[in-house]
Amino acid sequence: MNYTFLHPQYFWLLLLLLPMIVWYIYKQHNTSATLQISSLKGFMQSKKSKKRHLRHIPFTLRVLVISFIIIALARPQSSDSLREVSTEGIDIMISLDISGSMMAMDFEPNRMEAAKEVAIEFINSREYDRIGLTIFAGEAFTLCPLTLDHNVLINMMQNVNTGMVEDGTAIGMGLAAAVNRLRHSDAESKVVVLLSDGENNRGRISPLGAAEIAREFGVRVYTVGVGSDGTAPFPVTTAFGEQIREVEVRINEEQLQEMADLTGGRYFRATDREGLDQIYREIDQLERQEIYVEEYTRHAEEFLPFILIAGFLLLAEILIRNTILKTLP
């Protein structure tokens, strides 16, 4: 662990302590008694108080208080050293369908929550990959660009829900938005994991047109069809409240398969949570290649202990001045 200071110029303030110390020493040698008596003969045999050894403590504490405050102002930070490591680093965009049909309950608790939970597990397994998130329904937009800060990405993923954009299923737009984030990437491998539970019915770009664009930019697409076979329970709001009805599961598997084939990827079908989890694990194993990346330094603020110490020493000075070394006027 290394320690650095964000504002080291504040250490020049320590020079102000020198005139303080000089002035204190000067005062100690030029102090005259407030109460004058004709003779000290009566005090010669008296024992000297041990408190006289403590008289410099308040000033010493004051100097330390100022010193620790200046150190805190310099912003001490702890950091790990920068190093180059061998790892599997790949740029990955997750393109997630958030249309209303993702609330179907053939997955526990529903398709949307299951897709998010499994995606988060996948993100956590790719420590050195830059990963981003695109969502789509009737339209598409990038919620999180490619990033190594997976905590930010996971927080955004957890807040994803249906209704964030106009309803519908614009698969082509979802893929095109993800590819747009990857087209300037200089990574050796660029991947889109697109998850949908329906058929394309919206958007200015067709799914196969978006797949052609992905191929032109060297982006490999893994498509995942989500939904049980036949029908699935779906919550429907009626005049009598929310009811659960069986609705037909309609996934254009041929189109998703062709999209994957055009880009050198693969198509997967998930009919339950376990199947979806297995698909992500399989993609995780397929997209592994050794590259060298720099592991960047992470800084942590360390000024708080110095502020606490300064506060404690200031409190100690006040107590000593007003108790043990209290003087009468």
Image (cartoon, rainbow, N blue to C red):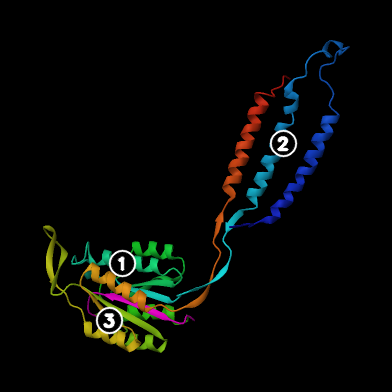
Q: Does residue 188 show up magenta in the picture?
A: yes
**Residue at image point 60% right, 38% down:** 311
Give whichever of discs 1 and 2 has the lower sequence position: 2
Which quarter of the figure has residue 279? bottom left
Q: Secondary structure at mark 1?
A: helix
Range shown magenta: 186-199
Marks 1/3: CA distance? 17 Å
Which callout, 1 or 3, points at the residue further toward the start of the chain?
1
x, y (%) of residue 70?
Answer: 67, 47
Look at mark 3 in the image and give the residue it sits on: 267
Height in image: 104 above or below 180?
above
Amino acid type of the residue tagged 1 in the rendering: Val
Q: Which residue is mark 1?
A: 118
| Closer to us: 29 or 45 | 45
Query: Residue 32: x, y in percent?
Result: 85, 23
Which corner quadrant of the image does residue 2 belong to? bottom right
Answer yes or no: is residue 98 visible.
Answer: no
* Direction from residue 92 to residue 97 in the image, left or right: left
Q: Are marks 1 and 3 in contact (CB under 8 Å)?
A: no
Quadrant assignment for the N terminus: bottom right
| Residue 296 appears left or right of 180 | right
Q: Are marks 1 and 2 in contact (CB under 8 Å)?
A: no
- Looking at the picture, does residue 39 appear above or below residue 234? above
The residue nearer to you, when weighing 224 against 278, is: 278
> Is residue 315 shown in magenta?
no
